[in-house]
Amino acid sequence: MRPTTIIDTCRDSDHARAFIAGVASGCEGLAFVSTGICPGCETCREEYAPDATPDGFEQLWQSGEVFAEPSFSPCGCEICGSTLGGNFEPWHAVDDNGEIIHGDRACVDCLLYLANGDLPEKWEG
């Protein structure tokens, strides 16, 4: 049996369970949930580089010249359901019909959880 780690303790906390449940609820029916700009996406190209061709947009994205800056909103996160305002990133996913959907507000906690599996130290839903 392996020893209990700080990660195990965090995952067992009430706020961690609530956060994970919030993310699961917010992502229900979605696959490939990610934050930032969708490479090769027409909707993202129109919003972030409207003058670029599709190939040009892909090159700008790969070089880091086109990106989405986090922005402040008093509204909550569309993924975990937190009602707190803060800095948010755009996000996208694929729905059950295979369509790419776009969201405007993924909080920093969700960004770190989706990218690395990191849980927030304190979360309020």
Image (tube, rainbow, N blue to C red):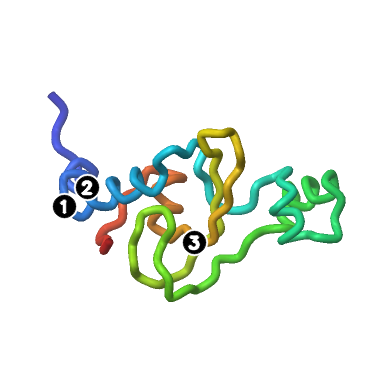
Mark 3 secondary-structure assignment: strand
Quadrant including the N terminus: top left
Q: Amino acid at mark 1?
A: Asp
Q: Amino acid at mark 2?
A: Arg
- Which dot, 1 or 3, sits closer to the camera? 3
Name the residue rendered at 81%, 60% in the picture: 50
Disc 1, disc 2: CB below 8 Å? yes
Q: Is residue 52 left or right of residue 84?
A: right
Name the residue rendered at 40%, 66% in the picture: 76
Residue located beneath label 3 in the image? 105
Tell me the crowding category of disc 1: few under 14, some 14 to 19, or many 20 or more residues within 10 angstroms, Cα based. few
Mark 1 secondary-structure assignment: helix
Residue 14 - label: 1
Q: Earlier in the sequence, mark 1 or mark 3?
A: 1
Real-space CA distance between mark 2 and mark 3, rounded to the nearest whole angstrom? 21 Å
Percent across and percent down for residue 74 are: 43, 75
Percent across and percent down for residue 99 are: 61, 39
Quadrant including the C terminus: bottom left
Real-space CA distance between mark 1 and mark 3, rounded to the nearest whole angstrom? 24 Å
Tell me the crowding category of disc 2: few under 14, some 14 to 19, or many 20 or more residues within 10 angstroms, Cα based. some
Real-space CA distance between mark 1 and mark 2, rounded to the nearest whole angstrom? 5 Å
Disc 1, disc 3: CB below 8 Å? no
Q: Amino acid at mark 3?
A: Arg
Percent across and percent down for residue 48 are: 72, 61
Name the residue rendered at 14%, 33% in the picture: 3
Residue 103 - label: none
Residue located beneath label 2 in the image? 17
Q: Earlier in the sequence, mark 2 or mark 3?
A: 2
